[in-house]
Image (cartoon, rainbow, N blue to C red):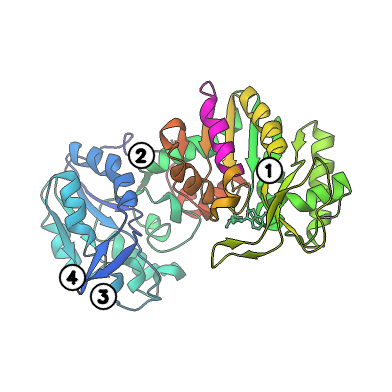
Amino acid sequence: MPKKTIRDIDLSNKRVLVRVDFNVPLEEKDGQMVITDATRIQETLPTIKALLEKGAKVILCSHLGRPKGQRDPKQSLAPVAPALSALIGVPVAFSEETTGPVAKAKAEALPAGGVLLLENTRFHAGEEKNDAELAKGLAELAEVFVNDAFGSAHRAHSSTAGVADHLPAVSGLLMEKELAYLHDELENPDRPFVVILGGAKVSDKIGVINRLLEKADTIIIGGGMAYTFRKIVQGISIGKSLYKPEWEPIAQAALDKAKERGVKLLIPVDAMITDAFDFDAKKLGTTKYTGVNESIPDGWEGVDIGPETVKLFSEEIAKARTVIWNGPMGVFEIKEASKGTFEIAEAMARNTSAKNIIGGGDSVKAVKKAKLGDKMTFISTGGGASLELLEGKVLPGVACLQEK
Ligand code: AMP
């Protein structure tokens, strides 16, 4: 980092291959595949529009679904072409072939300011293996490569990384923003810097906890993974709440590191508990709140943070100048267990003097469901990619881009 972007190179009249994330949800209606949520297309518009303004010839490629190297009409990108065309107001040509003579002829026929969408890169078995032939085939269509698919940047595939072996490669505007907020901003954050982590498993988030323990002033831990911490710190029993014995040494090490570095590590002090939990049916049994630092009875499990925890966490969030949040505070997919997650989103929204960053995955869903999206400074489009970046890992789809 920092990486060159489409602003740093001359793209006028150049054929530009842009890896976007058009992995949109599709539904069959009257025998046709229909896009049910165009958010991912909308996220790419700033880059596409900027390229058109620069007089580039824009060739778009993406994966969609998991066709496992086979052509599958139900996972074709064809419906995206008219949807994109309606959004940008220029025709979008479609190539049924991702590479090869048909795609090449269509790419070469593009005028400056023209747009071509290629068929699903995952119709080729080579894509997920980062096959060099496929990468070369893609590169032959263009003179420059732009990666704007942050959500796929943690994967070394032909269209996300391999193609950059053959073309000058720079970042798109969405990718640039993701790196700015999930990386650069956190290197030297405005303080206090508060990190909120939730979600199910200690093992999934420990990489992020360890990395951000080096940067944060406060780390707040909620969600299913908090029960392991509560068991250790508060010495309570946690009933049948989410827990694995092998998470205990991991959590203990994080607690030790926090102490050593002087980072405040906040964990829940109360919980909403239930005696029955059916995730698929989205149903809970009887629910109640525990008292502060009270054990969870046998046969009961914690599914959300309680009111005293919301107060404790919200007070800390109110003092922050930078907040990053990844992972829900409870089983927010079930309405009765979503309150804590939404109240944390509201606490962030209330702190208008902080940079509020939503670091991907389920917290994005929660913020959108709470209709607080416009109160946040940045909402990541990544899931796995956001986590890996927050862990400090090198993402192949970023590493392959030219340095500034
Ligand atoms: P992650 O993908 O690791 O961010 O985890 C998100 C998932 O964690 C969501 O599906 C939540 O329902 C789940 N989750 C959060 N809190 C709990 C909890 N207390 N018990 C079980 N699952 C939880």
Alpha carbon distance from label 4 to label 1: 47 Å
Of the image marks 4 and 1, the number of the one nearer the N terminus: 4
Q: What residue type is labelled 1?
A: Arg
- Give the Cα separation between the discs numbered 3 and 1: 42 Å
Q: Which is nearer the N-term, disc 3 or disc 2?
A: 3
Spatial separation of the CA atoms under disc 2 and disc 4: 30 Å
Relative to 322, say whether 227 is above or below: below
In this view, the mark in front (3 or 1): 3
Query: Answer yes or no: do the residues labelled 3 and 1 have beta carbons within 8 Å?
Result: no
Towards the viewer: 171 or 214: 214
Q: How far apart are marks 4 and 3 (CA)?
A: 21 Å
Residue underneath mark 4: 101
Q: What element carries label 3?
A: helix
Secondary structure under the numbered disc 4 in the rendered image: helix
Which residue is pictured at 10% across the width and 49% down the height? 111
> Helix or strand or loop: what does disc 1 sit on?
helix
Q: Provide residue 239's location: percent of width, then percent of height.
A: 80, 59
**The furthest residue to the right:** 235
Helix, strand or loop under label 2: helix
- Residue for badge 3: 73
